[in-house]
């Protein structure tokens, strides 16, 4: 479940959604509708551009439905969704992760995207185990939501977590969602089932509202092992909704799944069919082109996507795929690397070594983000230029880098001079130094 940026309620604009209990709720959030629902254009654009980035077919016409169910976080008793004809279908997501025995190989996989649909968000249930209470926060109720449905193409927690991270990166690149899982901007419901090879998929359970990629991996792997153990002991898998307990690393039952017939889907009477258009030429006469969503216009605004950027890094700079993986996945690291390359004579393969080992090593050791690095790309480029000129050795350059980290205001040349790390290349000077050493230690000679 993906909450688009500029979170605006379909019904009424509520600023700063999610800050404080009932701070931004309205009568509409509580299901007391005063006005008819109005579709948020930004949500439509976010869904279309996300669908394009995920190779989906964008339906020129999509429909809204009411999904009826009674639960405390949905006071209206129904949710607006797109069950019959969603806005985007039949896409794919290519993702990569570190695998192999030593987990140092970049493995690529592809998961099919069944559909992307626009929905209305529910409230948030907060479970208080000590008081045996469940509290309901309705701040986000009614906010526009994208639901992205993946096919059953993944076989373990690591694959699912990698797919979530790649999706998160794509959304952040597109600007359609900040992807902060801890704040509920991106939430995962994992459907898990086990079966023997060649047999149909087994009965599935749904682990709801997982709020980090790491927990996605843990929850799925636990649920796989739990279901296998149940079947091996002669039991049956119950079709139910479960929650992941991050403290114990287990999943716990929440409620039995409702059957499809229980939702009583019906066309949404307050929202007409949604039309998007290929280009300006396809817009009907009499319709203002500035008031519609056009696919060509959004397609032209697509930025360089993470997968394309990784391929470009490998092709343009001849670096290893695993290095491109790290560059793209670390926020701002690609830009940092390319700024260093533009300002130094050193080969990109040498630059990547310094970025991966020295820069990231120091950042990780001190738990800093890239934006907090005291060494700028230009400063690192200056250091590499001095190294390439032969004025200092590789070991001396590493010493200088550490000093740059402590004193970023000092220039590279100044540090080399202060630390007396410059190499002597003048033959006459070298002969004088050698002669002085010999004269000072005659017994050893």
Image (cartoon, rainbow, N blue to C red):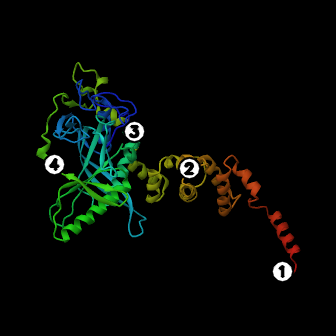
Percent x, y for residue 313?
46, 52
Element carrying mark 3: loop
Q: In terms of sequence position, does the residue under pointer 1 or pointer 3 come before the other? A: 3
* Mark toward the viewer: 1 or 3: 3
Disc number placed over residue 121 in the picture, else none: none
Mark 4 crowdedness (10 Å alpha carbons): few <14, some 14-19, many ≥20: few
Which mark is in front, 4 or 1?
A: 4
Along the viewing direction, whichever of 316 and 13 lies nearer the viewer: 13
Disc marking residue 258:
4
What quarter of the picture does the C terminus occupy?
bottom right
**Tag 3 or tag 4, which sits nearer the N-term?**
3
For label 3, the residue is: 175
Q: Nearer the viewer, residue 207 or 390?
A: 207
Q: Which quarter of the image is occupied by the N terminus?
A: top left
- x then y, percent, for residue 87: 23, 38
- State the residue in front, 97 or 443: 97
Above/below status of 100 relative to 331: below
Crowding around mark 2 (Cα neighbors within 10 Å: few <14, some 14 to 19, many 20+) is many
State the CA–CA distance, disc 1 to disc 2. Answer: 48 Å
- Dot 1, how many residues are within 10 Å of its Cα: few (below 14), some (14-19), or many (20+)? few
Residue 262 position in % (x across, y down): 12, 44
Observer-nearest residue: 372 or 9?
9
Name of the residue lying farthest toward the top: 286
Q: Is residue 346 left or right of residue 63?
A: right
Q: Mark 4 and mark 1: span between their CA atoms? A: 90 Å
First of labels 4, 1 by sequence position: 4
Q: Give the residue at mark 2.
A: 341
Classify 10 Å Cα crowding around label 3: few (below 14), some (14-19), many (20 and above).
Answer: some
Q: Are marks 2 and 4 in contact (CB under 8 Å)?
A: no
* Nearer mark to the viewer, of 1 and 2: 1
Q: Say which mark, if any, is on residue 444.
A: 1
């Amino acid at each position: 479940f993906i909450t688009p940026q500029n979170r605006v309620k379909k019904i009424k604009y509520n600023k700063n959604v999610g800050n404080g209990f009932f701070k931004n709720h309205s009568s509409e959030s509580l299901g007391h509708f005063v006005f008819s629902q109005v579709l948020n254009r930004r949500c439509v654009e976010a869904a279309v551009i996300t669908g394009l980035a995920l190779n989906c077919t964008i339906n020129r016409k999509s429909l809204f439905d009411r999904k009826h169910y009674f639960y405390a976080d949905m006071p209206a008793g129904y949710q607006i969704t797109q069950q019959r004809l969603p806005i985007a279908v039949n896409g794919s997501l290519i993702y990569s992760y570190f695998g192999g025995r030593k987990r140092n190989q970049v493995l690529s996989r592809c998961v099919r995207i069944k559909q992307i649909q626009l929905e209305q968000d529910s409230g948030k249930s907060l479970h208080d185990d000590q008081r045996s209470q469940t509290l309901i926060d309705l701040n986000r109720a009614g906010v526009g939501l994208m639901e992205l449905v993946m096919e059953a193409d993944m076989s373990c927690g690591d694959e699912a977590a990698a797919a979530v991270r790649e999706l998160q990166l794509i959304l952040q690149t597109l600007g359609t969602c900040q992807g902060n899982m801890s704040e509920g901007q991106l939430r995962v419901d994992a459907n898990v089932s086990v079966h023997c090879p060649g047999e149909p998929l087994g009965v599935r359970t749904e682990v709801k509202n997982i709020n980090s990629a790491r927990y996605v991996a843990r929850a799925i792997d636990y649920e796989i092992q739990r279901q296998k153990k149940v079947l091996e002991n002669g039991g049956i898998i119950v079709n139910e909704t479960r929650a992941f307990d991050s403290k114990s690393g287990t999943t716990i039952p929440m409620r039995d799944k409702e059957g499809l017939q229980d939702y009583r889907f019906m066309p949404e009477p307050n929202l007409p069919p949604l039309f998007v258009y290929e280009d300006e030429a396809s817009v009907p006469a009499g319709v203002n082109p500035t008031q519609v969503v056009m696919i060509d216009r959004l397609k032209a605004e697509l930025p360089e996507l993470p997968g394309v950027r990784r391929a470009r890094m490998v092709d343009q700079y001849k670096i290893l795929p695993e290095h491109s993986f790290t560059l793209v996945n670390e926020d701002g690291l690609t830009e940092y690397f390319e700024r260093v390359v533009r300002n130094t004579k050193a080969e990109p393969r040498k630059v990547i070594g310094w970025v991966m080992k020295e820069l990231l090593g120091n950042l990780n050791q001190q738990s800093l983000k890239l934006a907090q690095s005291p060494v700028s790309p230009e400063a690192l480029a200056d250091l590499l230029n001095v190294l390439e000129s032969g004025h200092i050795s590789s070991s001396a350059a590493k010493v200088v880098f550490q000093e740059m980290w402590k004193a970023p205001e000092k220039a590279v040349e100044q540090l080399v001079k202060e630390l007396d790390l410059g190499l002597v290349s003048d033959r006459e000077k070298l002969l004088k130094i050698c002669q002085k050493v010999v004269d000072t230690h005659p017994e050893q000679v």
